[in-house]
Image (spheres, rainbow, N blue to C red):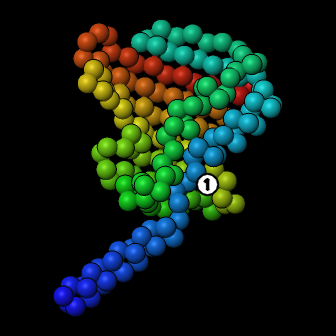
Amino acid sequence: MLRLLVLFLFLTSCYAEEVQQDMQREPFFDLSGYMQAQIDSLTALQPPVRKTVILNGTQETKELTNLRFATDLRMFREADINKPAWLDKYEVSNEEAGGGAQVQRYVATDSSVQTRQLEVTLNEVGAPTKIIVYRKTGTVLSDGDHILTYDPAVGYDIRTEQVNRFGEDLNATITVRWE
């Protein structure tokens, strides 16, 4: 009985140590927080933008002065991986990108998460200069691949390819450029 108690205490202390180490791990890049700050800034500035939508080959471009950035950038915020339950679901790597810049890459190790990869390019002072998100979505009726690209100096692109089991497939690109 004493041996079982000692074994139990040993195992629970190892588990507690592991949990504590996980809690001390650096969180991932806070995409949701960063995008919310960008939305707040863009909403306050209301820069004129050129928005181009290509839907299954049909293109439309508009010049806008009152774009609803919170709605348009929602997919970026939803792609955030910075959740405590997902600490073990992504592999993290860093690489030099030249000129003091670096690329932080988060690649999914679990196929159940929608955000398959997040790449954040940071300049020499640690500010994001480019964000690329690869997402995979799916239901019983469709499978979708999404590539989201955000460049705070230029604008953003959202590319979606959706294969539908019934009905027409969807190929869409939304491009927004600051003027």
Residue at the spot x=69%, y=35% of the render?
Answer: 39
The percent coordinates of residue 153 (x first, y second) are 69, 39
The percent coordinates of residue 96 (x first, y second) are 53, 62
| Quarter of the figure with the C terminus | top right
* Residue 2 higher or lower than 156, as above or below: below
Residue 116 or residue 159, whichever sits in front: 116
Does residue 149 appear in this view? no
Q: Name the secondary structure under disc 1.
A: strand
The percent coordinates of residue 118 (x first, y second) are 47, 47
Residue 94 or residue 135, whichever sits in front: 135
Does residue 6 appear in this view? yes
Which of the 4 quarters of the picture holds residue 11? Answer: bottom left
Residue at the spot x=67%, y=27% of the render?
Answer: 69
User: For the image shown, how many numbered marks are present on the structure?
Assistant: 1
Within 10 angstroms of label 1, few (less than 14), some, or many (20 or more) residues?
some
Is 48 left or right of 112, judged from the image as shown?
Answer: right
Q: Which residue is mark 1?
A: 122
Q: Amino acid at mark 1?
A: Leu
| Quarter of the figure with the N terminus | bottom left
Which of the 4 quarters of the picture holds residue 67? Answer: top right
The percent coordinates of residue 79 (x first, y second) are 49, 40
Is 4 left or right of 44, judged from the image as shown?
Answer: left
